[in-house]
């Protein structure tokens, strides 16, 4: 037969039950963070900006913007090491997905130009320019340069002025939201989602788990 | 049994505290080198909690102000950058300071010229 509980024991029981529920919620949140896995595959597009060999054993998808400080930090601090150790040797390829959520004409113009030059021209110098000074896109000189590209190459012109590049921007926007990504940079390695910047050593340790 | 019942809230409270604070990653600032020609290297730092970035010049912080963002200055950093450059290059003569700013701009122009020349076939 169960003995009657004293009031203080009732209080202890209720508090314990509340704490058990809170611990459960916290543990679920932490487990959710650890198992940050993508359940659907990422779509590939001919407009993706790819660094590395298509036959590489591991693909890293990077959702980035040249206007995000941590993305530029990735390119200046992490990418050179990554390139030297993994991309040049053909182990890894990096696929850039340029995220643009605003409808600012200069920002859209920048992404359209980047992906179209990457597809139909040589992207290296433009990439270097955008990493060094992303605000250059707001200048008349940049707009003039884009017009120069359009006048020089009909394929680039069709890509920038037609629907292809805009559809691509909308597709990335949709995918970014669908996967529940919160900001840039976001990386997907295998099916593991990594939100935010991390130093090279930390990045490398994640890569090694997948290779 | 009843004694255990009285101890349980303390044990559970300690577990919850451990899960909450023990697993919390420390917020830190990520800094990037900033080097106007002619002057010393400074850092531009961004707190990982999403706060305003700042320029760190010899321990003095010059904070950007997102509320002052414009289309050409999306992070509201122009004012902080100008103050940081002025402080950073205090030892430089006005001529050198002007030269530093012109050189910064000329780097962008050089890269733009290269991008213009080498991005498409003619």
Image: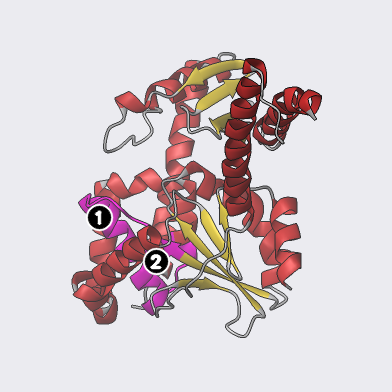
Subunit that carries the residue with mark 1 = A
Residue A104 relative to residue A14: left or right: left
Q: Does the magenta segment cover residue A98? A: yes
Which residue of the protein is positioned furthest toward the bottom in this rendering?
Answer: A55
Secondary structure, magenta segment, majority class: helix
Residue B39 seen in the current view: no
| Residue A5 sits in quarter | top right
- Count residues near mark 2 (Cα–Cα under 10 Å), then give few for <14, some for 14-19, many for 20+: some
Image quarter in which the N terminus of chain B is found: top right
**Relative to A61, does residue A32 appear above or below in the rendering?**
above
Residue B106 relative to residue B90: left or right: left
Residue B45 relative to residue A205: left or right: left
Identify which residue is drawn at 43% across, 61% down.
Answer: A179
Nearer to the camera, A59 or A22: A22
Residue A47 horizontal/vertical position (percent): 38, 75
Q: Secondary structure at mark 1?
A: helix
**Relative to A7, does residue A70 appear above or below in the rendering?**
below
Nearer to the camera, B3 or A37: B3
């Amino acid at each position: 037969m169960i003995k009657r509980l004293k009031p203080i024991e009732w209080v202890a029981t209720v508090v314990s039950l509340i704490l058990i529920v809170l611990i459960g919620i916290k543990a679920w949140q932490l487990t959710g963070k650890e198992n940050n896995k993508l359940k659907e595959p990422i779509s590939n597009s001919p407009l993706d900006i790819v660094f590395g060999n298509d036959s590489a054993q591991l693909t890293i998808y990077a959702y980035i913007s040249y206007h995000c400080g941590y993305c530029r930090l990735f390119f200046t601090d992490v990418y050179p090491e990554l390139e030297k150790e993994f991309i040049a040797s053909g182990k890894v390829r990096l696929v850039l997905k340029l995220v643009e959520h605003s409808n600012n004409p200069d920002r859209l113009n920048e992404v359209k130009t980047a992906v179209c030059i990457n597809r139909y021209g040589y992207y290296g110098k433009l990439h270097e320019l955008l990493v060094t000074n992303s605000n250059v896109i707001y200048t008349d000189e940049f707009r003039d340069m884009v017009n120069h590209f359009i006048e020089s190459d009909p394929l680039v012109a069709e890509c920038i002025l037609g629907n292809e590049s805009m559809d691509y921007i909308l597709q990335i926007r949709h995918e970014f939201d669908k996967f529940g990504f919160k900001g840039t940079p976001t990386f997907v390695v295998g099916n593991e989602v990594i939100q935010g910047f991390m130093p090279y050593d930390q990045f490398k340790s994640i890569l090694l788990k997948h290779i | 049994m009843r004694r255990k019942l009285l101890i349980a809230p303390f044990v559970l409270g300690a577990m919850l505290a451990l899960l909450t604070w023990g697993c919390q990653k420390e917020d830190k600032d990520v800094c990037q080198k900033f080097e106007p020609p002619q002057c010393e290297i400074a850092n531009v730092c961004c707190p990982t909690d999403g706060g305003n970035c700042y320029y760190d010049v010899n321990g003095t912080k010059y904070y950007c102000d997102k509320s002052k963002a414009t289309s050409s200055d999306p992070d509201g950093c122009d004012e902080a950058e100008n103050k940081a450059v002025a402080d950073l290059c205090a030892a430089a003569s006005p001529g050198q300071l002007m030269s530093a700013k012109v050189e910064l701009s000329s780097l962008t122009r050089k890269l733009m010229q290269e991008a213009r020349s080498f991005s498409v076939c003619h």
